[in-house]
Structures are given as C-alpha cells and as structure tokens.
Amino acid sequence: MKVIVLGAGVIGTATAWYLLKAGHEVTVFDRQSGAGLETSYRNGGQISVSHAVPWANPHAPGMVMSWLSRPDSPLSFHFGFDQRLPWIARFLYECLPSRTLENIRQIINLATYSRQKLIELRLETGIDADFVDRGILHIYSSPRMFDRAAKEARLMQDFGVNRQIKNVAECLTIEPALKAFRNHIIGGTYTNDDFSGDAHKFTQSLASKCEQIGAQFQYKTNILKLIPEGNHIAGVLCSNETGKNETCIADAYVAALGSYTPILLKPLGIRLPIIPAGGYSASIPVRETHDAPITSLINDEFKLVFSRYPKTLRIAGMVDINGYGTVLDKDRCNTLLKRAQQMFPNGGDYEHAEFWKGLRPSEPGNTPSHLGFTNYTNLFNNSGHGTLGWTMACGSGQAIADLVSGKRPEPDFRFACGSASYTALKKRCQAKVA
Ligand SMILES: Cc1cc2nc3c(=O)[nH]c(=O)nc-3n(C[C@H](O)[C@H](O)[C@H](O)COP(=O)(O)OP(=O)(O)OC[C@H]3O[C@@H](n4cnc5c(N)ncnc54)[C@H](O)[C@@H]3O)c2cc1C
C-alpha cells in the first residue's frame, strides 16, 4: 500500500520505519528542513516507563493550586474562558482514582512494549543516539512525596515495572554526583530497565535509515488540509518548498503532527483532546573537570528530569498551558538553571547553557487515547503522547503500522476504533490477519 505519514517528529519517523518494514511504500511530509526539529528536538531524553503516573492524578488539583501563587512554579497557566475549558474539565475527570489507575495501566502497557521495540531497533540498526543504559533514578525531598512514590512503585511492580525503592546511600551509589545535594534527599526509586538517549539524533538517524530502504522524506512542505470524500480521505493538499500547492494521493494517511494534529483534523469533524503543553530544556556543556550526573534522573519535587549526553547535561521540565507560543521566557529559563545548580553546583558550564522550548501534544490523561483508527477508513492518528512521546514512539509506530496492515497490535492498549466498536475492531483485525 502507498502510505503518507504527516509529520517527521520521532513519532512520524518511527511510524514510517515500521510501515516500511511491513512492506508499504512510504512518503513523509514535514514543514521543517529535517526530521525531529520541533518537539522531538531537545526533550528530556528519558525512555521512562517508570514515569507512568500522569499529571492528572488525585493529588494534582491540590498541587496545582499550591503552585499558582509561586513565581518559580513548574506550571504556568493563564486563566481565560477559551477552548481549553473542555480539556480542563476532562483533566479533572482523569484525576479520579479509578481513571488514574486505568491511565497508569495503559501508559505502562504501551511504554513497556515501546521500550522493548526500541531496544530491538537499536540492535537491528546499530543507531547510536547517545544512549545511556544506567536506569532512571527518581529522588525525593519530602516524606509525603516519598511515601506516595513508594506506593506508586509497589503499584507499578504489580503491573510488571521493576521500580525499586532505594535509601539515600543507595541513591548516592547509583549517582555519586548527587553528593552535594545529599542533605535534601530522603530516598528514591530506581528502574534499572529504563534508559536515556537523544531523541533528535535518533529521529534523524532513523529517517536516514528509512530513506536507505525506500522512504521519501519531503521536507519544507506545509500540510494544508486533508481532502475528505465520503468516509475516506482522497488526498492531502500540501504547499511545497517553492510555495506551489499540490494534492498528494495515497491509500492510507497517518497523522503524526504532534500538537498540530487537532488543527488538521478539526475541519474533518474529528476533535482530538490534545493541547500544546509547553516545556523547557537547558543543554549545559560538560567538561572533564565538571561533576555532572551520568545516570538519568527525575527530581520529583522540582519536577525536572536530567539526562546525560557525551558532552552535555540536559535538564528539562516546566509546563506552560498558554497556547502554541515557543518564545523563551527568561524567568522560566533562570528557574531551570537555578534548580540544576542547586543540585549539581559543578555540574557544567552553566553560563553557556542553551535553552529550548517545545510543545508536548498533551491529552488530559497523558495517554494517547485516540491512537489508532479515525472515522475515516484510511486515516490513522498517531498523536497525543504528551510527556512520553520519545518513550512511546517505537511501540506506537509499530502499532499503527499493524493497524494499517490489518493486524491486531500486540500491546494490551485501548486503541481508537473510529466508527467501529473495540470488539468489531479486534474482529476486523483478526479477520484480516487470518
Ligand atoms: C521539555 C520537554 C521534555 C520532554 N521530555 C521527554 C522525555 O524525557 N521522555 C519522553 O518520552 N518524552 C519527553 N517529552 C515529550 C516528547 O518530546 C514528545 O511527546 C514527542 O517529541 C512528540 O513527538 P511528535 O512526533 O508527536 O511531535 P513533533 O516532534 O512535534 O513532530 C511533529 C512534526 O509535525 C510537523 N508539522 C506540524 N504541523 C505541520 C504542518 N502543518 N505541515 C507540515 N509539518 C507539520 C512538525 O514540523 C514536526 O516535525 C518531552 C517534551 C518536552 C517539551
């Protein structure tokens, strides 16, 4: 089949790879000059199944209220009666204990599958995206948060995640560079199977591998609209590098435009509960004389993640629910640096930090709940991965390739079925496989 993938972020590129492997003819469109140049560019780098507790959880409303008055809050939110209201209402619903539990289960199932697919892909292709296979350590400063984390860790163990509770000495053995911050740590949790890597480097390398086996990547191409015809998509209207509009036709289309997918699908009557949640990262040069962490970390109190690349320490975090803007806010950048310096006083050359802001394609429950079929028979959605798009990229790509090929995806995940019921979807896939 001829398949057009819309978007060359980590999600679209991974989808292209698995579609090619399934024997399809693949073309990828993106407005940028290369792959992985928007949200997949400088994220936190973590492949973290252990980060499965969504923002929407029973503690979130209280926490959000306490943050609103703080100038250095991890959350920036401008009030207003706008289109975010249905999303916020849904977010509150997803904070119910039963919903949180279901979202954790969904996230773990897809993320665990995805982490395994990435490991296999690394072995198959030899892609080197500065992976650091040292697990992920979460550290805690407040007894209340640590107590909560211990409960979460036990819950995740029940779901098959090897997240272990650690005392302070064990945390320091895992990451000796935490010694300057020792007095602020009361414990941690450690997940040996998680790891980190550079999502941008991975996306670019994978795009090249895709091209080597026959995919076409058309960059500097603006996707303007999908053209419906009855209950299927007849083509996609694009504007190419020279500004010329052209309609491109395929048998199937995969929307992987991150935070921009809802804008493309809205005229088709498809309303996706995805909003852009801005986040920041700082990339700090590291030399041999510095004492930077080598293990990927999460400081739960600061809501920051740390990942190490050969010559760089990456710190990422913050949530701006303020629309599609990516202009850097100086105060937020300074907060990021201040926190990093507090934890690692000699962690790198902070004066030469490079800042970046990206837009997480965020659903209220932090699960890509509309992953799969849409109401159009040949249009598939692969967007809405929120804080875990790098973690879920390979699994989601494989799953969409399976659905396009008429196979049932492997993970126990509630894929969207478009107009069909889930049972009908399963039957449909099984029938095609048979
Ligand atoms: C600060 C921060 C830290 C993060 N840390 C982590 C982490 O540690 N681990 C993790 O798993 N995830 C993390 N994430 C989340 C992860 O980065 C995202 O979920 C993921 O990158 C989303 O990938 P995507 O391919 O869906 O979107 P994108 O990477 O944004 O790709 C979408 C593509 O579509 C293209 N596009 C959009 N509209 C159009 C159009 N009209 N025409 C043509 N092209 C278009 C864009 O150019 C872009 O290339 C983080 C995110 C942020 C912001």
Image: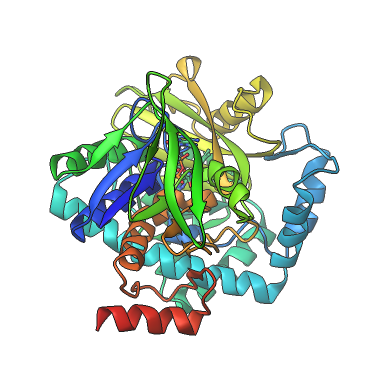
Name the image quarter holding residue 366.
bottom right
In the visual, does 306 lie left or right of 101? left
How many numbered badges does the structure rendering display? 0
Q: Residue placed at 41% from the left, 81% from the top?
A: 426
Measured as percent of width and height from the top left, residue 346 is found at 45, 25
Quadrant of the image containing the C terminus: bottom left
Residue furthest toward the front? 229
Measured as percent of width and height from the top left, residue 85 is found at 79, 51
In the visual, does 7 lie left or right of 67? left
Q: Residue placed at 36% from the left, 56% from the top?
A: 252
Q: Residue placed at 42% from the left, 66% from the top?
A: 110
Measured as percent of width and height from the top left, residue 210 is found at 21, 44
- 158 or 228, nearer to the observer: 228
Q: Is residue 47 visible?
A: no
- 156 or 104, nearer to the observer: 104
In the visual, does 127 lie left or right of 97? left
Measured as percent of width and height from the top left, residue 303 is found at 60, 45
- 423 or 152, nearer to the observer: 423
Q: Residue placed at 61% from the left, 37% from the top?
A: 278
Name the image quarter holding residue 307.
top left
Q: Is residue 93 visible?
A: yes
Quadrant of the image containing the N terminus: bottom left
Q: How is the image coloured?
A: rainbow
